[in-house]
Amino acid sequence: MVFEKDLPVAIIGGGPVGLAAAAQLVSRGLSVKVYEVGSAVASNLLDWGHVRVFTPWRYCVDAVARELLESHGWQMPEPEAFPTADEIVDHYLAPLAKLSELAPSIETNARVVAISRWGADKVLSKARETRPFMLLVETAKGTRRDSARAVIDASGTWQTPNPLGAGGLPAAGEMEFGDRIAYGIPNVLGRDRHLYAGRTTLVVGAGHSAANALLELAELAQTEPGTSALWVTRSTDLVRIYGGGDADALPVRGELGSDVRQLAESGRVRLVTGFAIVAIREVDGRLVVEGQAMDGLRTLGPVDRIIAATGQRPDLTLTRELRLDLDPWLEGVKALGPLIDPNEHSCGDVPPHGHRELSHPEPDFYTVGVKSYGRAPTFLLLTGYEQVRSVAAALAGDMAAADAVQLVLPKTGVCTVPVSLSGASSQGCCGGPAPAAVDACCVDDAKAKASGKSGCGCGSTQAIAAMRSDDLEIAAQ
């Protein structure tokens, strides 16, 4: 099949980064096609629309998208105000998608399920770059095949959450009791209030998603008797979620960490650290969770519901027939892996990077946005906006602009390196930094009836070695 020069650049995902990519490309005179799986743009953000983000408006709007909007009379919200995800959609992304420059190119309710090359699987090398991309697209009308000259994957990771199982696979019973497990950040004080009021909820995760859920459950408990929360983390070092406090350049992020720390230290939320979940079972209509702790298998509960704030992972089935170069354990773009690996870094900083780092052996295919980080946390919209600016310039042939990558991110105010598995001086009860608060409610099956409670509540570095991406700076899918 001969390459057609007038084919569009396909953008998978109509969230903040995907729409910014579209604006960047359109401003350079290139044809685009945006595929959004939801019924409206930024459907992933709407899923956690009640959450207020860490970044003020001035960090949430792409520069070229702003120029397009302002040319139609749009006014920027107060730059220093902190919007909710709903507000980002209502006041920025929805108006952007309605602009005459972009609206004809955006298709909603369109799921790209696979990408390949016309007439070539990933094995074929000869003249590969001359064949257009083929996108398998599912819509309400059926499945079709579209062509594209290049593809920008900004589909994010929100729709593929990590399981509760500590080994990266679903815990035993996780699928069976899926109707009582919420992944991400449910709207505890809003649409989901009836599910949590008067019940005990287990919150799993050591990131900001977990913090949001815990704080909302604590607020709900003030007006709904019988509402309580139990917080479980695999890690024993909570410095990443507690953050840098006043030293954080994003004050809302610092405040969130301080608030959840105070919540745990006050005893209003019971905290168990070093607990690696392996199974979920039902006892008398409620859920009991089994996990590996420092001194063996223990059980926790009973609880009524579980919130799995355990992060997300990229969907790799989408690109199985493409030649991608991915980090072997983070599953993001390989060039970024060593810079953002949570086994080595807890900072939100990452050196400026653009089209060269985001490209693959597959010509004209780019992974951008939070998906470029794979399973690693702490992605900021500013990073995604600079990524797509560089990629758009490269696709337009402006290599000078594409290579002139500049990015200055707000500092976290805290940076640590996890405890080495080879051994480190013990400062807490389990060989790592002492947690701020520990609830000894890990119940050993053999001792449950006799004593009710046992254990210090935190585990060995061996039990928590594989840290999970359970953070949410802002899900820019």
Image: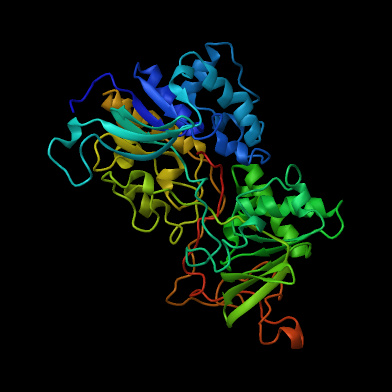
Q: Position of residue 436 (x, y in %)?
A: 68, 66
* Residue farthest along the top direction in this orientation: 72
Residue at 28% from the left image edge and 27% from the top image edge: 149
* Residue farthest along the front direction in this orientation: 141
The residue lying toward the viewer, choosing from 296 and 378, is: 296
Residue at 48% from the left image edge and 67% from the top image edge: 167
Quadrant showing the N terminus: top left
Would residue 153 be seen by someone viewing this image from the given angle? yes
Q: Position of residue 425 (x, y in %)?
A: 52, 77
Residue at 55% from the left image edge and 77% from the top image edge: 431
Q: How many marks?
A: 0
Q: Position of residue 326 (x, y in %)?
A: 32, 50
Would residue 394 be seen by someone viewing this image from the given angle? no
Q: How is the image coloured?
A: rainbow
Residue 48 falls in image quadrant: top right
Is 233 situated left or right of 214 in this image?
left
The residue lying toward the viewer, choosing from 146 and 213, is: 146
Residue 273 falls in image quadrant: bottom right
Q: Position of residue 173 (x, y in %)?
A: 58, 67
The residue lying toward the viewer, choosing from 285 and 318, is: 285
